[in-house]
């Protein structure tokens, strides 16, 4: 798995004219070698020359965490008194063009640039972005496993097993987070709980507002689940529940949202552009008169990272490929009163869109 990914990375480096890739914190490293760098002041960096062996430069005290992958990379632990910047610069040699991991801390980038003055610098995502966007079979399996676990938490919400009335959003958010871990996630990435008027803010942070009967509660949550090979894959789902029968205005809007979301899922076939998938949802919401209340993109790619390529947004003419994995999550937001969003993770396949989330799509009344 890792050797094969490394081969694809090297081929892409050739196409992009990148001589060496330097990967530190962020999703590229676990995707490529199954190891996640600790986000610390001590540098961890994988040096990948286009030809020749890859080397993981790592503080000696963190070396025991690394799973050896013979033939993929060599381990180069360094002592507390060693300058790792110099070590990386030596391993990179006279690279004319460097691809530096997008999330590498500026303190390391600045020091590396001070030592490698003859090199020109690009973002590593030029190489890794398009490769990571197309999931292989093992990655789709991992995404489905995470999605299924998130579905189980959504079913608990819809089944009334997660108490809402009288609790604060923050309490419900913590409860959802615990359940994500119970269902097999190693990490909770977010658990948005937005009740009543708070749901009109798409990225509302759960706060101390007490949830009341008669309200619609929007829950958008996801975590990371470690798969075979060492990298973690993300889940991300949104479901809304109504505590008691919703007002007609809300039920009508939800019917439009549901139709729009299903239309965009159905539109996500191989060869269709990302912007056409966005339009499939948007046209339905616009035609129903809610166009100005749907003011974000329809979705984002997902994998080792919660948000990555491809983005399902107007202006993105990228045609879907088999293995592209992304969210479909239109919303309708009425400032001051209510908000709603419906989100599934979908994989484009040769035999049509594969929706990984199966939790009830309706506005479940609890
Ligand atoms: Zn988001
Ligand atoms: Zn979400
Ligand atoms: Zn999402």
Image: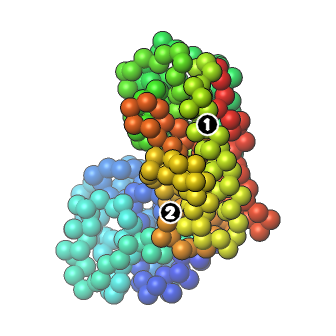
Q: Which residue is mark 1?
A: 252
Residue appearing at x 27%, y 67% in the figure: 109
- For the residue pair 192 and 287, the one nearer the viewer reads as 287
Q: Which residue reaches farthest top? A: 166
- For the residue pair 357 and 340, the one nearer the viewer reads as 340
Q: Please tell me the numbered disc located at residue 313.
A: 2
Q: How is the image coloured?
A: rainbow
Residue 85 spot, x, y in % from top left: 27, 67
**Is residue 170 shown to the viewer in this render?**
yes
Q: Nearer the viewer, mark 1 or mark 2?
A: 1
- For the residue pair 45 and 76, the one nearer the viewer reads as 45
Q: CA distance from mark 1 to mark 2?
A: 25 Å
Residue 231 spot, x, y in % from top left: 57, 53
Q: Please tell me the numbered disc located at residue 314.
A: none
Badge 2 crowding class, 10 Å Cα cut-off, few under 14, some 14 to 19, many 20 or more, is some
Compared across the picture, whether 151 is left or right of 25 comes to right
Q: Which residue reaches farthest right? A: 351
Element type at marker 2? loop
Residue appearing at x 60%, y 44% in the figure: 257
> On screen, 8 above or below 180?
below
> On screen, 118 above or below 153?
below
Badge 1 crowding class, 10 Å Cα cut-off, few under 14, some 14 to 19, many 20 or more, is few
Residue appearing at x 68%, y 35% in the figure: 362
């Amino acid at each position: 798995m890792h050797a094969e990914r490394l081969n694809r990375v090297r081929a892409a480096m050739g196409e992009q004219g990148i001589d060496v890739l330097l990967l530190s914190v962020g999703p590229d490293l676990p995707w490529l070698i199954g190891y996640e760098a600790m986000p610390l002041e001590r540098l961890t960096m994988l040096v990948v020359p286009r030809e020749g062996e890859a080397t993981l430069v790592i503080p000696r005290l963190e070396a025991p965490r690394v799973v050896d992958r013979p033939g993929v990379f060599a381990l180069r632990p360094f002592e507390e008194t060693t300058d790792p910047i110099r070590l990386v610069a030596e391993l990179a040699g006279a690279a004319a063009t460097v691809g530096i991991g997008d999330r590498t801390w500026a303190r390391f980038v600045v020091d590396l640039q001070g030592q490698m003055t003859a090199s020109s610098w690009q973002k590593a995502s030029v190489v890794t972005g398009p490769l990571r966007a197309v999931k292989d079979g093992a990655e789709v399996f991992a995404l489905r496993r995470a999605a299924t676990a998130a579905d189980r938490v959504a079913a608990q919400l819809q089944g009334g097993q997660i108490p809402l009335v009288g609790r604060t959003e923050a309490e419900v958010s913590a409860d959802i987070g615990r359940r994500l871990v119970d269902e097999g996630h190693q990490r909770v990435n977010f658990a948005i709980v937005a009740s009543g008027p708070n749901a009109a803010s798409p990225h509302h942070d759960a706060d101390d507002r007490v949830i009341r009967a008669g309200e619609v509660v929007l829950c958008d949550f996801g975590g990371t689940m470690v798969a075979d090979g060492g990298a973690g894959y993300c889940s991300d789902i949104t479901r809304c529940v109504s505590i008691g029968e919703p007002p007609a205005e809300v039920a009508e809007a939800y019917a439009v949202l549901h139709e729009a979301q299903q239309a965009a899922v159905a539109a996500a076939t191989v060869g269709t552009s990302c912007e056409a998938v966005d339009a499939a949802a948007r046209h339905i919401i616009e035609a129903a008169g809610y166009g100005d209340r749907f003011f974000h993109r329809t979705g984002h790619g997902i994998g080792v990272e919660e948000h990555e390529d491809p983005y399902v947004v107007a202006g993105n003419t990228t045609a879907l490929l088999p293995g592209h994995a992304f969210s479909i999550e239109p919303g309708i937001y009425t400032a001051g009163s209510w908000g709603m969003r419906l989100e599934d993770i979908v994989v484009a396949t040769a035999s049509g869109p594969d929706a990984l989330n199966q939790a009830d799509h309706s506005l479940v009344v609890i």
